[in-house]
Amino acid sequence: MIKVYRITGRILGKEEPMFFRKEYRALKKEDALEYLYSEMGSKHHVKRTLVKVEKIEEIPEDEAKDPVIQSITKMY
C-alpha cells in the first residue's frame, strides 16, 4: 500500500543552511528518501552529501499539505 511520507531537513553548502519540508508518496521510507535525493539533485543541483535529513515520518493522507499529493489522494 502506498503511504505518504514527510521529510524535513536542511541543505548545506551556502553561507546559511536552507531548510526544507517535502512530501512524497512511496511504498517504503527508503523510496521516499531516494525521491528526495533525486529531486534535489535534478532541480537544485545539490549533491547527496550536502542534503542532511533530520526527520522522516509517515503521515495520514489527509494531513498532506502538498497540493499535488492532495489531488492524487482525492482520486482514490
Image (spheres, rainbow, N blue to C red):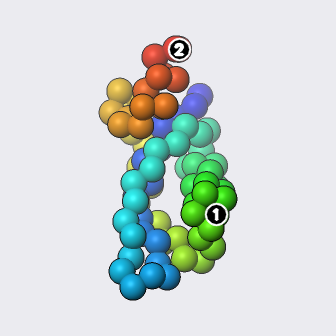
**Is there a contact, CB below 8 Å, between mark 1 and mark 2?**
no
- Res. 30 in view: no
Give the SS element for disc 2.
loop
Q: Residue at x 63, y 73 (%)?
A: 47
Q: Residues within 10 Å of mark 2 (few under 14, many from 20)?
A: few
Left or right of 57, for residue 32: right
Within the image, what quadrant is residue 56 found in?
Answer: bottom left
Q: Of the residues shown, which amino acid type is indicated by label 1?
A: Gly
Tell me the distance, in whole angstroms, between the alpha carbons under discs 1 and 2: 30 Å
Q: Residue at x 62, y 67 (%)?
A: 45
Percent from the top left, x then y, of residue 40?
58, 60
Relative to 31, is 46 above or below? below
Q: Which residue is mark 2?
A: 76
Relative to 72, is 58 above or below? below
Q: Residue at x 39, y 85 (%)?
A: 15
Q: Nearer the viewer, residue 16 or 3?
A: 16
Give the SS element for disc 1.
helix
- Res. 14 in view: yes
What is the residue that sits farthest to the bottom in this orientation?
A: 15
Q: Residues within 10 Å of mark 1 (few under 14, many from 20)?
A: some
What is the residue that sits farthest to the top in this orientation?
A: 75
Q: Residue at x 61, y 38 (%)?
A: 27
Q: Of the residues shown, which amino acid type is indicated by label 2?
A: Tyr
Left or right of 43, for residue 14: left
Pick whichever of labels 1 and 2 is earlier in the sequence.
Answer: 1
Percent from the top left, x then y, of residue 42?
66, 59
Percent from the top left, x then y, of residue 71?
47, 22
Q: Which residue is mark 1?
A: 41
Within the image, what quadrant is residue 16 found in?
Answer: bottom left
- 1 or 2: mark nearer the eye: 1
